[in-house]
Image (spheres, rainbow, N blue to C red):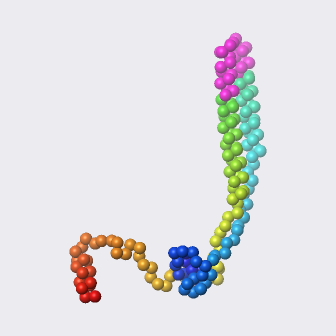
């Protein structure tokens, strides 16, 4: 977290900057997002028309098979298979439509998005003191001269 006034960095959340005393609580504002309403009626009627057309095809095929002389299992099995196929496709499309509707309803509930608003009159500047490296004193050099120089410096300190 950085101070919006002087740019000092703080690890935890605080209310006021310890360096310059600026207010660190950033005001939040809500922005409403207007999502256009999709047209579900067209999808519903397309699924209904597909289901009715599939039933018409199944009954027409049943009638044609009966006119050709098929009886018993030879007539019922293709008819039931066709009905199961049409109902499976229709139920899959209805399931997808239900997911689409629920996703749209969920997005309406989450339409208010909180955004952080920084003050416009105060520029954010870099910290004044140097930042200590996280990896300082953790890397090793395989050059023996580096260790000899470090040992000499320790003797004279």
Quarter of the figure with residue 123: bottom right
Q: Is residue 81 left or right of residue 135?
A: right
Residue at image location 69% in from the left, 54% down from the top: 106
Locate the N terminus and report the quarter of the image it occupies: bottom right
**Does 78 sit above or below residue 146?**
above
Depth check: give the residue in front, 65 or 120.
Answer: 120
**Does 23 sit above or below residue 74?**
below
Q: Is residue 136 left or right of residue 143?
A: right
Residue at image location 47% in from the left, 84% down from the top: 129
Residue at image location 53% in from the left, 81% down from the top: 8
Q: Main secondary structure of the magenta part?
A: helix
Is residue 124 in view from this perspective? no
- Rendering coords of residue 114 (x, y %): 67, 67
Q: Is 125 covered by the magenta stretch? A: no
**Does 52 sit above or below residue 25?**
above
Q: Is residue 147 left or right of residue 22?
A: left
**Does 49 sit above or below residue 74?**
below
- Rendering coords of residue 95 (x, y %): 68, 41
- Rendering coords of residue 20 (x, y %): 57, 87
Locate the C terminus and report the quarter of the image it occupies: bottom left
Q: Is 72 covered by the magenta stretch? A: yes
- Rendering coords of residue 7 (x, y %): 54, 81
Depth check: give the residue in front, 9 or 72.
Answer: 9
Residue at image location 64% in from the left, 71% down from the top: 116
Is residue 94 in view from this perspective? yes
Q: Is residue 112 left or right of residue 147?
A: right
Tally of numbered discs: 0
Span highlighted in magenta in the image: 61-84
């Amino acid at each position: 977290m950085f101070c919006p006034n002087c740019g000092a960095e703080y690890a935890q959340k605080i209310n006021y900057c310890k360096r310059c005393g600026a207010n660190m609580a950033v005001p939040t504002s809500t922005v409403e997002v207007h999502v256009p309403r999709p047209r579900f009626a067209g999808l519903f009627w397309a699924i209904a028309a597909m289901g009715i057309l599939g039933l018409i095809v199944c009954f027409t095929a049943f009638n044609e098979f009966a006119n050709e002389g098929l009886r018993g299992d030879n007539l019922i099995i293709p008819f039931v298979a066709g009905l199961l196929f049409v109902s499976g496709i229709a139920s899959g499309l209805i399931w997808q439509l239900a997911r689409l509707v629920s996703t749209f309803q969920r997005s309406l509930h989450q339409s208010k998005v909180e955004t952080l608003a920084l003050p416009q009159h105060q520029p954010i500047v870099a910290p004044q003191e140097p930042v200590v490296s996280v990896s300082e004193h953790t890397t090793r050099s395989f050059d023996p001269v580096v260790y000899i120089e470090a040992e000499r410096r320790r003797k004279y300190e």
